[in-house]
Amino acid sequence: MSAESGGARPEDGSANRLENLWDKTRADAMSEPERLIYRSNLLGSDKRITNYGGGNTSAKVMEKDPLTGEQVEVLWVKGSGGDVGTIKRDGFATLYMSKLNALKNIYRGVEFEDEMVDYLTHCTFNLNPRAASIDTPLHAYVPRVHVDHMHPDAVIAIAASKNSKELTQEIFGGEIGWLPWKRPGFELGLWLSKYCAENPTARGVVLESHGLFTWGDTAEESYLTTIEIINKAIAWFEGKITGPVFGGVKYTPLQEDQRREIAGRLMPVIRGMISASESKAGHFDDSAAVLEFVSSNNLDPLAALGTSCPDHFLRTKIRPLVVDFDPSNPDIEKTLAGLEAAVAEYREGYKVYYERCKRDNSPAIRDPNAVVYLVPGVGMITFAKDKATARISGEFYVNAINVMRGSSSVSTYMGLPEQEAFDIEYWLLEEAKLSRMPKPKTLAGKVALITGGAGGIGRATAERFLREGACVVLADIDQTALEAAVADFSKRYGADQVRPAMINVTSEQEVIDGFAYALTEFGGLDILVSNAGLASSAPIAETTLALWDKNMDILAKGYFLVSREAFRVFETQKIGGNIVFVASKNGLAASPNAAAYCTGKAAEIHLARCLALEGAEKGIRVNTVNPDAVLRGSKIWTGEWKEQRAAAYKMSTDDLEEHYRARSMLKLSVFPEDIAEGIYFFASPASAKSTGNILNVDAGNAQAFTR
């Protein structure tokens, strides 16, 4: 079995082995907590070892008690909600081992184990604010200094097999033990303690349907043991799996461009159907591992079993939705026509599952829509509250695919029992964790496309949207500026949140292709900011037809083309939409020697009014922001326009900004960030009852007053 999370599977099995990345010289110079962080980051850097946010690590360290001054044993363990791959010192909870051991004296039994979580705060060392996770007892009660708990696909494939106990013995002998399924918590911690006491030479244990525990007396020993055991599992599967997997190939996957086209058609339709309670962002995955599964004979029966590992299940729900699509006879219109019934059937099935499994004290039913959508011959689509969560949910399901690949090839794959799955999904402790999550930002789950996105106003608008949680497609014709903007935003807001699109708004095909790209990358569209522009200045007698046409192409045709494409997406999603035009004061107030520019801007304003009328009954709002004299950061002021306007007003270019400031009623300069604030207002829920409006952001200009 390959434990890769996608990509081609090398024929040379050694290519799948985990590499020993431990740098002894570097590690020996570290303190024990620093070595724990180092070990955690190494293990979390490879998805073959554990998924994002999955697994945890710990070390028992002698520390000076801040009250008594005595040396005491302290458990450093990954705190609640952390990720071992990126964790830093503040991501670890620290607890007195003496107090953790004392908890055994007040434990009332498995029926009351959840109450033990509240006692963990009483064990906190040095007032550490990091909340301890439910897995803390599992680490505390293993009598070794260093403990690793990972979710490697190769080991979970063993753990999720019908005869997992026998397979564990066959592969690892007595050095790795086995424990039956038990939900993480205090009781499982006691099970591990008992196992270690009865098997003092064991190096770890496989937890049925869950994962792997390994340990050591040093950080290096624990790390090397984890790598060694996972590699042994990978090698064993490679020796066993020699024939077809997943029941063999049923369909030949479509070509990449076809796969993306179909995903782009499906995603906004699905998104519209599942976004009633909250906006959702999408992710598309057509990696080799996914295509192998969705193109197989056993896709339907295996998908119906759901996932095994609790971490996989929490991210991907009870099971995925398999979309009715035949890649050997692709009829996308037929598939689209059947989606509404399929989504409704999934929701109803989820509600029945909830009613069948709920307890007297279960939280209320949550969003009943699927997270994972599997499309035969095409790939996997995932939707979640934001792009990062959608991507990570997809990665978790790829982990599940790898697990099913191994288990179903050497044994019978076993999904998590339904009641156990429900009890984890609706665990009161999980509900409490969800309730502590910060309130979603105002544009969370929203997708925006901004033309002229690499310029001053476009970039400031993107910044404003990203701060509020939106996914942003920056569209521009300046590749250098576009790449710089995307690199900057990716570094500060995360690569999931922003995408570049080279779009010339005067090209119908480029506009169509750019919007299709946005749909495949983020699943849909909520906001269009039409901002691409130019500026020109010439007396009417000197205005050439070419100059006139250039203004009309960009400022009128360009705005029409992107608006038309946005309307098409909004009408497909059926959840409304939002268009903001960035026009100009010059669309309302005449200006000398700029007839082409002013006329183009006036056309934008009137187009917005027409679209507001047409879109209202569909929930599509269209508003306009009129800037004036935004010199700083604006690309249109870096060329001849600045010189031409200075000449028109008979002054130096250096005096132009002060001229515009002094000319304004408020005697203030206008900056890109000021325009971005106006655009954000129209794009946000604060203006939910506004359409067809014009907002002047010009520091006051009586000529531009709307009448």
Image: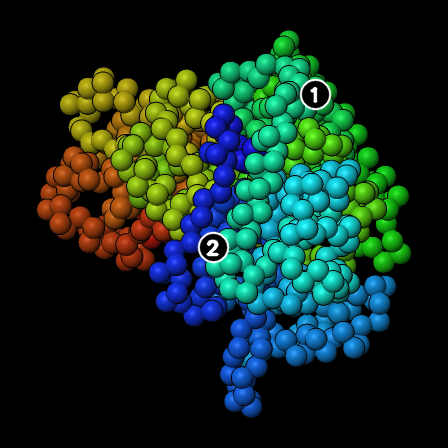
Residue 463 in picture, x, y percent from top left: 40, 48
Q: Nearer the viewer, residue 203 or 508?
A: 203
Please rate how many residues cluster around mark 1, counting C-alpha atoms within 10 Å: few if below 14, some from 14 to 19, many from 20: some
Query: Which residue is label 2 attached to?
Result: 41
Rendered residue at 56%/90% (across/down) = 68
Apparent side of residue 368 relative to residue 437 in the rendered image (left or right) = right
Query: Which residue is label 1 attached to?
Result: 247
Label 2 secondary element: helix
Instruction: Work out whether mark 1 precedes mark 2 in sequence or the reverse, and give the earlier one.
Output: 2
Residue 450 marker: none
Residue 636 in picture, x, y percent from top left: 25, 37
Rendered residue at 80%/72% (across/down) = 107
Label 1 secondary element: loop
Question: Which quarter of the figure is the N terminus placed in?
Answer: top right
* Position above or below: 187 against 354: below
Question: Which quarter of the figure is the C terminus placed in?
Answer: top left
Rendered residue at 15%/23% (across/down) = 542
Label 1 is placed on what type of residue? Gly
